Image: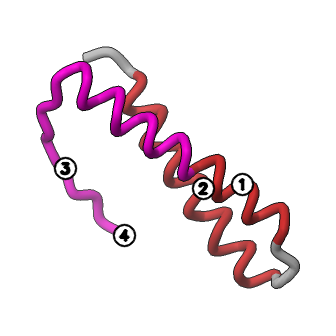
Amino acid sequence: MTATEVTLTLNDEEKELIQEILEERHRSLLMEISHTDHHHFKVVLQKKARLLESVLIRLAVPV
C-alpha cells in the first residue's frame, strides 16, 4: 500500500470537532467488535479501529 500525504489546515475548533467525531466512531467500532461473533467481520472492524487510532494519534501531535 502506498502512502498519500494530505495537508489540511484546520483552526482549533475544527480540529477538536474532527477529533471528537473520530473518537466517537472509534468507541462505536470497539463496541461493534465486542458484539460481533463473525470472525471475518471482526477482523475488518479491528483493522478500521487500528487505522482510526493511528489518525487520532497523529492529530494529537502538536505541529
Residue pointed to by mark 2: 49
Residue at 84% over, 68% down: 35
Q: How far is mark 4 from mark 2, CA to CA?
A: 18 Å
Q: Are marks 3 and 2 in contact (CB under 8 Å)?
A: no
Give the camera-side residue of 13 and 57.
13
Q: How far is mark 1 from mark 2, CA to CA?
A: 7 Å
Residue pointed to by mark 1: 30
The tag earlier along the polypeptide, 3 or 2, is 3
Figure label count? 4
Q: Secondary structure at mark 1?
A: helix
The tag earlier along the polypeptide, 1 or 4, is 4
Q: Are marks 4 and 3 in contact (CB under 8 Å)?
A: no
Q: Secondary structure at mark 3?
A: loop
**What amino acid is labelled 3 in the image?**
Glu
Residue 15's label in the rendered image is none
Q: How far is mark 3 from mark 2, CA to CA?
A: 20 Å
Residue at the top extreme, as displayed = 62
